[in-house]
Amino acid sequence: MTFLRAVLFAAFAMLAACSMAPSDDSPFDGDGDGLSDGIERSAGLDPHDPNDAALDPDGDLLSSRNELLRYHTDPHQRDTDNDGLMDGDEVLVQHTGPTLADTEDDGLDDGEEVLVYATDPLRADSDGDGIADGEEVHGFVLFDRVTRVSTDPLSVDTDRDGLHDGLEQQVQDRFATYASAKNAEELLRGALNPDDPVHTPALGG
């Protein structure tokens, strides 16, 4: 009887231990570091180390705890969205989304805007001319549907002809829809080309 009682006690103890063991999606935090054991395991951290949540293993200026709970970034990758800016720089300096390569969706990655073009990664149209930064940089096709021009995303009037780039592009787009506008072709390739500093449109009337 004593042996049977001992076996039953051991079985109940095992069941109790199993029921108390945390699952990967439970909020159980065995080391008390602010991260549940499940989160730590999935992120490659040690659920028995109370210090690793405050560390910065990828050197991006964000602790593992903040990366996992606040910013939803990868604590083992300096640049989670691969946009050319490390996560800490995006969060602390640029205020861009560390999980969005192109925060304002203007066609340029945040890193390109900050490091290459000096445009505003939080404004789709840095110079306010009506053309998104990415479209200005990568270029758009003129009226002839062949010539591709790029304009300056930091200048409202790239060719300094008195008409801002957005207006010139709108004229190009409008005439491109006309079935026959051959008489305007020379003007559109020249004076109303937003990247043509040689030909200036006549603004008298």
Image (cartoon, rainbow, N blue to C red):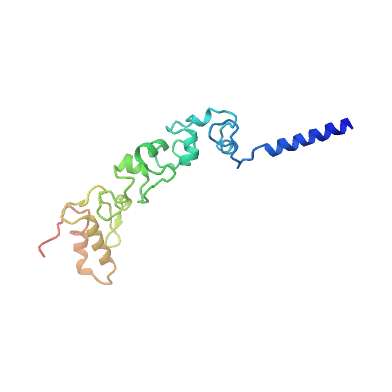
Seen as rendered, the residue at the extreme left is 204
The front one of 12 and 181 is: 12
Query: Which residue lies at the image location 31% right of the left edge and 49% below the top edge?
Result: 123
Can you give x and y, in whole percent of width and height, for residue 81 in the image?
A: 44, 43
Query: Looking at the rendering, which quadrant does residue 12 occupy?
Result: top right
Residue depicted at 44% across the width and 30% down the height: 59
| Relative image position of residue 90 (x, y in whole percent) | 38, 39
| Nearer to us in this view, 202 or 107 | 107
Which image quarter is the N terminus in? Answer: top right
Q: Is residue 205 left or right of residue 25?
A: left
**Which residue is painted at 57% across and 28% down in the image?**
49
Q: Quadrant of the C terminus?
A: bottom left
User: Image height check: is 200 above or below 154?
Assistant: below
- Compared across the picture, whether 25 is left or right of 55 comes to right
Is 160 left, or right, of 170 in this rendering?
left
**Residue 47 image position (x, y, % from top left):** 59, 32
Vertical side of 94 occupied by 135: above or below: below
Q: Is residue 43 above or below residue 165?
A: above
- Label total for image: 0
Outermost residue toward the bottom in this view: 179
Q: Position of residue 57 (x, y in %)?
A: 49, 30
- Give left or right: position of 104 versus 176: right
Q: Quadrant of residue 25?
A: top right
